[in-house]
């Protein structure tokens, strides 16, 4: 019976579906250069969203095709180890084999209950070589300085060409040389073995293009990112040379949209990125270049390894308890787990399905470095012993339909994971005066940059923002977000009579999407000193006309610039 079961046919159909997905992924990605050259910024955003949605669309197509072709035979899960074995043989010589494993897992999970997940039927643990064991492929270009930094930069840009001209390449290269000399030790730029190594393909995201690599000598190395811009109506501009690891890390942050880049061998490119950004987990690096499903696989493997090899236990996450979500974490694992409560606070008008829609929306919009990326999981199973009793009791109380104890396991039927950050309200309680000022300034910038990306946070309380390890303020509570252009910003009309001001009820009508920015100060800040400071830093956020101006720009079709790095002021660019 087992010999007659069509394991190889099923494996081949799954792999054919993966090839179809990869080809469509490649077509969208390959269009990034033309969109950059033609300054098609709205099309770039649409392509980014389409590429994210592509995965689930293609998984659905393959699952439907398998059900139609194999019907009852397919649903015999006891035979799926044979399918897995046949599939391993098919992917062994591929350059994207690790992604193919994740694809197989997605197909399996679309066909079967998560109760049937096992390493015998799917790839809970990978069968692929680790990054360290893979032979490095030649996907990079190297340039030797030979004591003349300017000549090396000219050689680089002789190789990286576009269909439209540079606005003023000699000027830009002179600026790059000055920036490199200022950011690297004096002796480095005189070292005859100084080398720049760049990934051969250009990375594209939003309105920018990026050359990514490293600067190194025999003894030291620095990451190197060179952003390129294409202002409408002008030629391409080389904007900066970034060698600070923290700044480069932010460019590849979990708060950013995914890059579009032609990657022949994903594992090798991720290995290259890992060498220049050793603090990044490989899950985050895969995600940053658009392979977010495989990033999810790598995250899950890191999580189960952490649980198996440490005494870490789940606790409730620090901070004010949410009115919609309950949040728990592992102290030694830099992630929070968010579940939807069964009952919301009376002040919340959303329902469960709306919350799910809001969180999924964040996946497909431009996060501009100000919204944490999320991964959605179903049917997580954890050992009961891995929960602190107080944590488990609270989860069972607020979300009994989602968190269930089954013997020695805890089943979490649905959750999101996010990078753990310090809640902004807790951060400012323990910060110095200077740190408070910097945090509140960045908080205002975060709100403005989200607005520039057509996102209105809704609930802008400090507790809904976090501070990253780089000191950036990031929004992470999405149950009330909406598009900025959906909001009706209004000024509070003057009172009709003196009694109006004394009334506990407003003397004017308020529709569901009406927002009155002049009400923000007491709502956002109970601390009067923080309120006054924020008014000095970002008082324009209290003016309805500020928000209306942004709406007008967005409705006119303009994609507002939000840079993922600090731009240097250089006199010769003015």
Image (cartoon, helix red, strand yellow):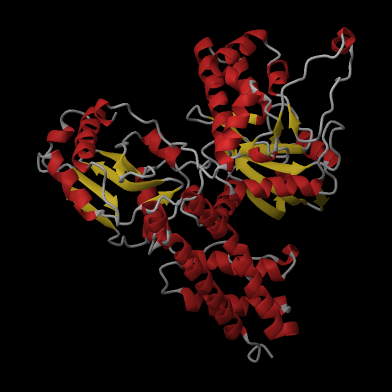
Residue 299 visible somewhere in the drawing: yes
Q: Image quarter for residue 320?
A: top right
* For residue 343, side relative to residue 557 (left or right): right
Task: Give the position of the C terminus as an image quadrant.
Answer: top left
Q: Is residue 44 above or below residue 220?
A: below
The spot of residue 234 in percent (x, y) is: 33, 44
* For residue 87, side relative to residue 508 (left or right): left
Task: Give the position of the N terminus as an image quadrant.
Answer: bottom right
The spot of residue 161 in percent (x, y) is: 26, 54
* For residue 197, side relative to residue 33 (left or right): left
Residue at point 84%, 39% (across, down): 398
Residue at point 25%, 49% (across, down): 197
In the depicted view, which residue is nearer to us: 213 or 510? Answer: 510
In the depicted view, which residue is nearer to us: 344 or 574? Answer: 574
Q: Is residue 440 above or below residue 254?
A: above
Q: Image quarter for residue 460?
A: top right
Q: Is residue 354 above or below residue 17?
A: above
Residue at point 81%, 53% (across, down): 407
In the depicted view, which residue is nearer to us: 203 or 311? Answer: 203
Considering every residue shown, the one lying at the far front of the view is: 496
Q: Is residue 59 above or below residue 488?
A: below
């Amino acid at each position: 019976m087992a010999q007659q079961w069509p394991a190889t046919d099923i494996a081949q159909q799954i792999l054919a579906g993966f090839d179809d997905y990869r080809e469509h992924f490649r077509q969208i990605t390959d269009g990034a250069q033309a969109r950059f050259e033609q300054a098609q910024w709205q099309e770039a955003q649409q392509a980014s969203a389409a590429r994210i949605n592509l995965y689930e669309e293609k998984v659905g197509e393959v699952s439907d095709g398998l059900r139609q072709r194999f019907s009852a035979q397919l649903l015999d899960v006891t035979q799926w180890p044979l399918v897995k074995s046949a599939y391993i043989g098919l992917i062994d010589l591929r350059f994207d084999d690790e992604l193919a494993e994740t694809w197989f897992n997605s197909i399996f999970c679309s066909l079967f209950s998560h109760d049937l997940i096992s390493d015998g039927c799917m790839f809970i643990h990978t069968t692929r070589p680790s990054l360290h064991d893979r032979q490095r492929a030649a996907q990079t270009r190297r340039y030797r300085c030979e004591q003349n930094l300017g000549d090396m930069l000219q050689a680089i840009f002789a190789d990286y060409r576009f269909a439209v001209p540079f606005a003023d390449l000699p000027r830009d290269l002179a600026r790059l040389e000055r920036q490199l000399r200022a950011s690297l030790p004096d002796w480095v730029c005189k070292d005859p073995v100084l080398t720049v190594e760049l990934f051969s393909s250009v990375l594209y995201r939003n309105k920018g293009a990026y050359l990514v690599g490293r600067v190194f000598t025999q003894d030291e190395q620095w990451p190197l990112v060179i952003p390129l811009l294409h202002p409408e109506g002008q030629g391409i501009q080389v904007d900066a040379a970034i060698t600070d690891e923290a700044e480069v890390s932010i460019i590849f942050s979990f708060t950013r949209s995914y890059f579009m880049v032609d990657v022949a061998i994903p594992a090798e490119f991720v290995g290259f990125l890992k060498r220049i950004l050793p603090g990044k987990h490989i899950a985050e690096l895969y995600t940053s270049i658009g392979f977010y499903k495989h990033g999810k696989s790598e995250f899950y493997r890191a999580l189960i390894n952490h649980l198996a090899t440490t005494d870490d236990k789940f606790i409730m996450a620090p901070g004010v308890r949410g009115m919609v979500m309950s949040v728990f974490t592992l102290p030694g694992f830099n992630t929070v787990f968010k579940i939807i409560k069964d009952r919301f606070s009376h002040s919340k008008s959303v329902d469960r399905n709306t919350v799910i829609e809001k969180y999924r929306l964040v996946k497909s919009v431009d996060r501009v470095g100000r919204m944490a990326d999320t991964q959605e999981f179903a049917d997580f199973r954890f050992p009961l012993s891995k929960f602190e009793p107080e944590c488990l009791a609270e989860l069972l109380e607020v979300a009994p339909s989602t968190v269930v104890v089954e013997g020695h396991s805890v089943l979490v039927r649905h959750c999101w994971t996010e990078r753990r950050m310090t809640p902004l309200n807790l951060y400012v309680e323990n910060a110095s005066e200077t740190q408070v000022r910097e945090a509140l300034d960045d908080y205002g910038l975060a709100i403005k940059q989200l607005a520039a990306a057509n996102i209105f946070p809704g609930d802008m309380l400090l507790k809904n923002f976090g501070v990253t390890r780089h000191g950036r303020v990031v929004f992470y509570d999405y149950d009330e977000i909406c598009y900025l252009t959906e909001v009706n910003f209004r000024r509070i009309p003057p009172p009709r009579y003196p009694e109006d001001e004394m009334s506990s009820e407003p003397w004017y009508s308020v529709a569901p999407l009406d927002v009155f920015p002049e009400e923000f100060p007491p709502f956002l800040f109970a601390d009067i000193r923080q309120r006054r400071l924020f008014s000095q830093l970002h008082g324009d956020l209290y003016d309805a006309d500020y928000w209306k101006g942004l709406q007008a720009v967005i409705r006119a079709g303009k994609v507002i610039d939000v840079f993922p790095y600090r731009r240097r002021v250089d006199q010769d660019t003015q």
